[in-house]
Structures are given as C-alpha cells and as structure tokens.
Amino acid sequence: MIPDRERPGPPGKFDDEHYPGYTMGRAADMLGTTQGFLRSLDEAGLITPQRSAGGHRRYSRHQLRLAARVRELVDQGTAVDAACRIVTLEDQLHEARLLNRALQGEPDG
C-alpha cells in the first residue's frame, strides 16, 4: 500500500512522484506485466529508469503511470512504439495545460 500523502510532518522522498522507489520486479508486479515490457519502454525512449548503485533499474510513480497507460493501449491492439508516442503526447499536453493555467493564475485542476 502506498502511504497517504496527507500525513503530518515534512514531505519526504516518497512524496515525490519522481522518486525512483520501485524495483523492476515490483513495478512489473504492480502493472501486471513482464520485466521485458518495462525494458521495451526504456528502449522506446518513453521511460528512462534511474539505476541503483548495482545497476538495477528503479522506477518512479510517474513512470509507472505512463507505463500503465501504454499497457492499456497495447492491450487494445496498439503497437508499443505507437502507444509510447501517444502517451508522450498526452503527457506533454497535460504539462502544457498545467503551465497555461499557472500563467493565467488559475488553480490546478
């Protein structure tokens, strides 16, 4: 279970959605996929996991959300490369909308 963000105290590294807190095995289990699928996302350039001191891939919650979206598209019959491109564009659009709202002084939503 992922800890609740509403806990008291200062934010920690696990509150950061970009903190690489998940091993490849754990990430694959959480997504219900194979480690090879995650490697293919790395090869396609969608996700570049950080590496531990021992060279093992480590994934963030943000990367797992992207991988989950790719898996949805692949399960619907989209090729992995095309699914990665779609997810990249969706993510860029989301970030652009957030930036646009911030520049206009609107609250996130």
Image (cartoon, rainbow, N blue to C red):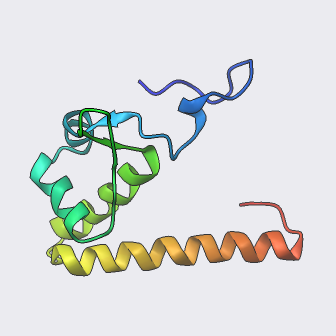
Quadrant containing the C terminus in the rendered view:
bottom right
Whole-percent x, y for residue 25 in the image: 19, 35
Whole-percent x, y for residue 63 in the image: 39, 53
Residue placed at 42% from the left, 40% from the top? 20
Q: Which of the 4 image quarters holds residue 57? A: top left
Residue placed at 38% from the left, 59% from the top? 66
- In the figure, is residue 103 to the left or right of 30? right
Of the pair 78 and 36, the residue shown nearer to us: 36
Q: Is residue 72 above or below residue 84?
A: above
Residue placed at 33% from the left, 51% from the top? 49
Residue placed at 49% from the left, 70% from the top? 91
Whole-percent x, y for residue 69 in the image: 33, 62
Q: Which of the 4 image quarters holds residue 1? A: top left
Whole-percent x, y for residue 75 in the image: 16, 65
- In the figure, is residue 95 to the left or right of 77? right
What is the residue that sits farthest to the right in this orientation?
105
